[in-house]
Image: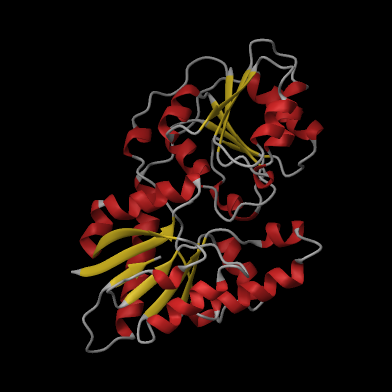
Amino acid sequence: MLRIAHLHDDRASYGLARYLAFLQSDAGLGALAEHRLVPVSRFAAGAARVEANVIVSHLPLSWHSLPGLMALRARHPGTTLVHVEHNHCEGLLAASTRRRGRLRTSLRSGLALFDHVVAVSQAQARWMRRHALVPTGQLSVIPPSSDLSALATLPGPVGPVRRIAAVGTLHRQKGYDILVQAFAAVTAPEARLDIFGDGPQRAELRTMARHDPRVTLHGEVPAQAALRLADAIAIPSRWEPFGLVAQEAQVAGRKVLMSGRDGLSEQMGPGTVAIADLSVGAWSRALSDVLAAPAEAPRLPAELPHEATLQGWRALLERVALRQPGKATGFATI
């Protein structure tokens, strides 16, 4: 049995925490390997004591994290290191006009420490190849997933759309400032906007919504609880390497309004609407349209994203094992 220890930052994002829990608990993945979660500081990866043949990093890459990753590489010179990139994508670099060159340099420096890199979407992988961030032979694509079993049986909404929810970290990336302003222009008095999550933009969003009693900031709750309350989900992300909540919402039979940026473009389905224009006016019109429509939406079969994740990990583990002839195969994921 393969041994995989997942080292991750103790401040893992809302979606990443659900993905890591899935990696540890899913029966299909458990048949491939034994998965173990090990929290470490993003700035001190080298302090992790890991007995494994392969270490897979879920840590965010930055200039500040490089010394710790270099120490990790030095501490495990004979170990295959794999990095899963959850944060950077084309949209992020496009939004970082003043430090685009520095970001690319830090990414190349960090990724060069690893033997293999995993992109979470095809869009992210194409961007990595285009900017030569990773040699093609060292790059795989594995879309994340989460435990979708409860969402697959969640009762679908009935009647017209009344409650629109946003679920995720309260950060400029997510575009919730656009969403709150767009919702303020919606005239339907019975409409509600529920925002679930926490993060650096919480105070700003609370101030923006203070005059609209239809808007509620709930803090972090389990994704299932947020989706149970919602008739539709809004994802106005400025950039998004993957966007796990789009997958979860479709499995739960909720309509999804999303920007379609980066990895979100690969999650379009029968119950989704893409609003690429991130202006307040465009999103206000989209919100008004969905509020005037029935809430029912087709469900995404839960086995489809699960199988994509399982196949991706199976292919990666087989690929890594071929590089280690004669070695007992064990894996550690950071």
Q: At which x and y percent is residue 286?
A: 71, 30
Instruction: Looking at this view, name the residue that lies furthest to the top.
Output: 189
- Residue in the image at 71% along x and 33% along y: 204
In-image side of 84 versus 88 (left or right): left
Image quadrant where one finds the N terminus: bottom left
Name which quarter of the figure residue 169 lies in. Answer: top right
In-image side of 250 versus 93 (left or right): left
Q: How is the image coloured?
A: secondary structure
Q: At which x and y percent is residue 192?
A: 61, 18
Q: At which x and y percent is residue 321?
A: 30, 80
- Residue in the image at 29% along x and 66% along y: 4
- Residue in the image at 33% along x and 71% along y: 49
As drawn, 303 above or below 220 = below
Instruction: Looking at this view, name the residue that lies furthest to the left.
Output: 1
Give the mark count. 0
Instruction: Looking at this view, name the residue that lies furthest to the bottom.
Output: 326
Image quadrant where one finds the C terminus: bottom left
As drawn, 101 above or below 205 = below
Name which quarter of the figure residue 301 lies in. Answer: top left
Q: At which x and y percent is residue 15?
A: 48, 46
As drawn, 138 above or below 8 = below
As drawn, 11 above or below 131 = above
